[in-house]
């Protein structure tokens, strides 16, 4: 297996405050990892460090074997980042948004490829020419994931991707993430949703006040991580 994302003794400070302290983990190609924790745990800071927006105070954050902060352009070329609220243009439809953002990335936007990507994320055909301002959050997330698919980025960083989605949309989103991983994408998502993390991730890293306080793996042959064990650990640290 090839290590795609790696944090080694990673410590990061923001505005003079220590946010991450000696965090270490490796993510192999085709794996889904979740950073689980409450507000202020350091989850989003971790993503921003892999994107090169923040530099480590000590330790390292590597993307495809290279330090992200020293190879920012290469790191961002390899990564598709999905924030909690996808930044798509409300006055444009799905096709127009995809064509515009692909043009910025100097990527091709042939119509058959657009439709294939939108079919893969299960965006209904009759919605694709509707203005984005009429979309639900789940529909917007689908378009953003379709963009990541079309960019062919090998790495996806997802920041609270299911926040505000209804249970059916969450299950659909999790199935899509698993499908992407099975096709070779490497995915790191941050969340405070214990149930969702246990069902979608191969490994969960529990963060609390910037420290890695627990790691949980999906047992061989099982379709999820032990929800009760993760919930108990999450509750213990949240009340600390």
Image (cartoon, rainbow, N blue to C red):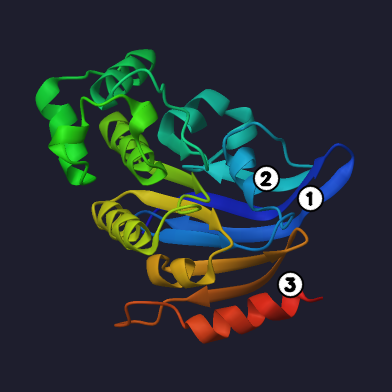
Mark 2 highlights which residue?
45
Quadrant where the N terminus sits is: bottom left
Q: Secondary structure at mark 2?
A: helix
- The residues tagged by marks 3 and 1 sit, at their Cα atoms, a distance apart of 16 Å
Q: Is residue 196 left or right of residue 36?
A: left
In depth, the one of 218 and 25 nearer the eye is 218
Quadrant where the C terminus sits is: bottom right
Answer yes or no: do the residues labelled 3 and 1 have beta carbons within 8 Å?
A: no
Q: Position of residue 39 (x, y in %)?
A: 71, 56
Q: Position of residue 193 (x, y in %)?
A: 53, 65
Q: Position of residue 35 (x, y in %)?
A: 57, 60
Quarter of the image for residue 211 reads: bottom right
Q: Is residue 191 left or right of residue 162?
A: right
Mark 1 highlights which residue?
19
In depth, the one of 102 and 55 nearer the eye is 102
Q: Position of residue 129 (x, y in %)?
A: 21, 25
Compared to 222, does 139 lie above or below?
Answer: above
Q: Secondary structure at mark 1?
A: strand
Give neighbour class at mark 3: few <14, some 14-19, many 20+ (Cα, 10 Å). some
Q: Which of disc 1 and disc 3 is earlier in sequence? A: 1
Q: Secondary structure at mark 3?
A: helix
Compared to 204, does 130 lie above or below?
Answer: above
Marks 3, 1: nearer the viewer: 3
Mark 3 highlights which residue?
238
The total number of labels drawn is: 3
Give neighbour class at mark 1: few <14, some 14-19, many 20+ (Cα, 10 Å). some
Residue drawn at (56%, 79%) of the image: 230
Answer yes or no: do the residues labelled 2 and 1 have beta carbons within 8 Å?
A: yes
- The residues tagged by marks 3 and 2 sit, at their Cα atoms, a distance apart of 19 Å
- Residue extending farthest to the right is 16
């Amino acid at each position: 297996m090839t290590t795609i994302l790696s944090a080694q003794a990673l410590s990061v400070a923001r505005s003079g405050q220590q946010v991450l302290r000696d965090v270490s983990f490796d993510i192999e190609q085709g794996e889904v990892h979740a950073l689980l924790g409450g507000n202020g745990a350091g989850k989003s800071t971790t993503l921003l460090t892999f994107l090169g927006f923040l530099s480590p105070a000590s330790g390292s954050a590597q993307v495809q074997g290279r330090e992200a902060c020293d190879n920012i352009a290469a790191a961002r070329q390899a990564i598709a980042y999905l924030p909690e609220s996808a930044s798509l243009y409300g006055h444009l439809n799905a096709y127009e948004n995809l064509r515009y953002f692909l043009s910025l990335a100097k990527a091709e936007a042939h119509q058959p490829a657009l439709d294939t990507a939108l079919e893969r994320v299960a965006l209904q055909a009759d919605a694709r020419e509707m203005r984005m301002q009429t979309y639900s959050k789940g529909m917007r997330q689908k378009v953003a994931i379709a963009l990541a698919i079309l960019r062919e980025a090998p790495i996806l960083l997802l920041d609270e991707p299911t926040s505000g989605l209804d249970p059916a949309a969450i299950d659909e989103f999790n199935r899509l993430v698993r499908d992407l991983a099975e096709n070779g994408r490497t995915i790191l998502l941050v969340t405070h949703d214990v149930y969702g993390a246990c069902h979608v991730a191969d490994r969960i890293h529990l963060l609390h006040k910037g420290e890695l306080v627990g790691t949980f793996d999906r047992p061989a042959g099982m379709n999820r991580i032990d929800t009760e064990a993760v919930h108990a650990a999450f509750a213990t640290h949240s009340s600390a």
